[in-house]
């Protein structure tokens, strides 16, 4: 009904959505950077839970393609970027490739393991960024606590799919690169033009895999509508919030502010997908969350 009404008004649904998103920059700017990160976490994990429900219809790579292509379309309509400067092109292309690879690997892991477990393993990436280069004993202890949580999680997951865990670990490596590249991208543009171009690059990289995986299912009206919702929740909203936050806080601080990510993912998996975890698995997730929260609390003021 909403889509039909918008089309009768002479505007496509994507244009209407782009206008709605573009009309709130002051609101986003008024949100503290820490709150921006937390809002992004909730959005991306609930979006991932809904995305997993599409796997049986469009496949994991198909859902990734819908997510990235729709997100790119909305961002391009919002920012209407011009061709980037030559010096900015490597950062934009690298960001797009890493973004596509991270999402493909993460969704492949979701096909095999629960959302909460996948995010907990993937979370090693941003935590590594948070602790990278630190020479303090306290930070080493936080790192050991996080590593212990992941080991406990793997051991407590009876019949865990090793390939799924490896996919999640690979996504974590990409996540670490994404954090560093996001900071570089944010320093080269004062708006979302760079993000829009990078998202378009990511969509182009993922498209061949998605078409091969889903085929004509990508054109199903239901799949397209849900895919648009996933794109907004999992890409447009969180990435825009995170990019804005990274203009105000360093990558290390951003990494440790993501401490609630595994817990939020586990709750989203439970509420949306009915993926119940064992008490020992919850303990393992809490170890990772506590490690990140501790690193955040004890971070040096100048980082």
Image: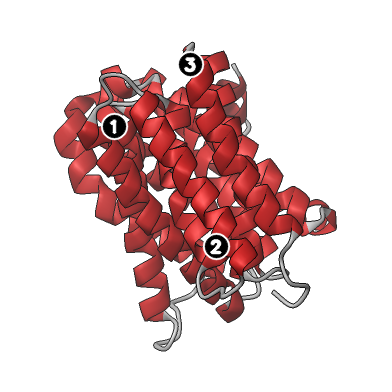
The label shown at residue 278 is 3
Image quarter where the N terminus lies is top right
* Label 2 to label 1: alpha-carbon separation: 36 Å
* Whole-percent x, y for residue 55 in the image: 31, 23
The quadrant in which the C terminus is found is bottom right
Of label 2 and label 3, which has the lower sequence position?
A: 2
Question: Which badge, 2 or 1, is on the more N-terminal residue?
Answer: 1
Asked if marks 2 and 3 touch (Cβ < 8 Å), the reply is no
The residue positioned 61% from the left and 36% from the top of the image is 43
Relative depth, front residue between 226 and 157: 157
Q: Position of residue 223 (x, y in %)?
A: 37, 23
Q: Nearer the viewer, residue 189 or 161?
A: 161
Could you tell me if residue 80 is visible in this image? Answer: no
**Residue at point 42%, 88% (across, down):** 87
Write down the residue under mark 2.
140
Q: Is residue 270 left or right of residue 294?
A: left
Which color scheme does this rendered protein use? secondary structure
The local crowd at label 1, few if under 14, some if 14 to 19, many if 20 or more residues have their Cα within 10 Å, is many
Q: What is the quadrant of residue 215 in the picture? A: top left
Residue that sits furthest to the bottom in the current view:
87
Splitting the image into 4 quarters, where does residue 70 fall? Answer: top left
Relative vertical location of residue 291 with respect to residue 56 in this rendering, above or below = below
Circle nearer the viewer, 1 or 3: 3
Whether residue 26 is visible: yes
Q: Residue at x 29, y 27 (%)?
A: 219
Distance of mark 1 from mark 3, alpha carbons?
26 Å
Question: Mark 1 highlights which residue?
Answer: 60
């Amino acid at each position: 009904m909403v889509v039909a009404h918008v089309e009768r008004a002479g505007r496509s649904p994507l244009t209407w959505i782009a206008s709605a998103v573009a009309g709130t920059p002051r609101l986003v700017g008024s949100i503290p950077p820490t709150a921006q990160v937390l809002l992004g976490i909730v959005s991306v994990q609930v979006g991932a839970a809904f995305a997993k429900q599409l796997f049986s219809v469009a496949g994991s790579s198909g859902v990734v393609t819908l997510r990235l292509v729709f997100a790119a379309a909305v961002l391009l309509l919002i920012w209407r970027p011009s061709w980037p400067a030559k010096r900015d092109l490597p950062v934009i292309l690298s960001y797009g490739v890493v973004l596509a690879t991270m999402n493909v690997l993460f969704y492949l892991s979701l096909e095999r393991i629960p959302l909460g477990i996948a995010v907990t393993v993937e979370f090693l990436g941003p935590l590594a960024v948070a602790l990278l280069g630190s020479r303090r004993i306290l930070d080493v202890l936080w790192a050991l606590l996080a590593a212990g949580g992941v080991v406990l999680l793997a051991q407590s997951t009876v019949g865990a799919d090793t390939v799924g865990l490896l996919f999640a670990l690979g996504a974590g490596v990409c996540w670490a690169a994404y954090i560093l590249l996001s900071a570089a991208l944010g320093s080269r543009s004062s708006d979302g033009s760079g993000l829009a171009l990078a998202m378009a690059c990511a969509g182009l990289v993922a498209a061949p895999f998605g078409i091969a995986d889903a085929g004509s299912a990508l054109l199903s009206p239901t799949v397209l509508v849900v895919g648009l919702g996933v794109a907004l929740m999992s890409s447009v909203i969180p990435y825009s919030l995170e990019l804005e936050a990274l203009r105000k806080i360093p990558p290390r601080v951003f990494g440790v502010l993501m401490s609630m990510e595994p817990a939020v993912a586990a709750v989203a998996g439970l509420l949306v997908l009915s993926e119940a975890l064992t008490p020992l698995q919850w303990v393992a997730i809490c170890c990772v969350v506590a490690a990140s929260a501790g690193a955040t609390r004890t971070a040096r003021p100048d980082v």
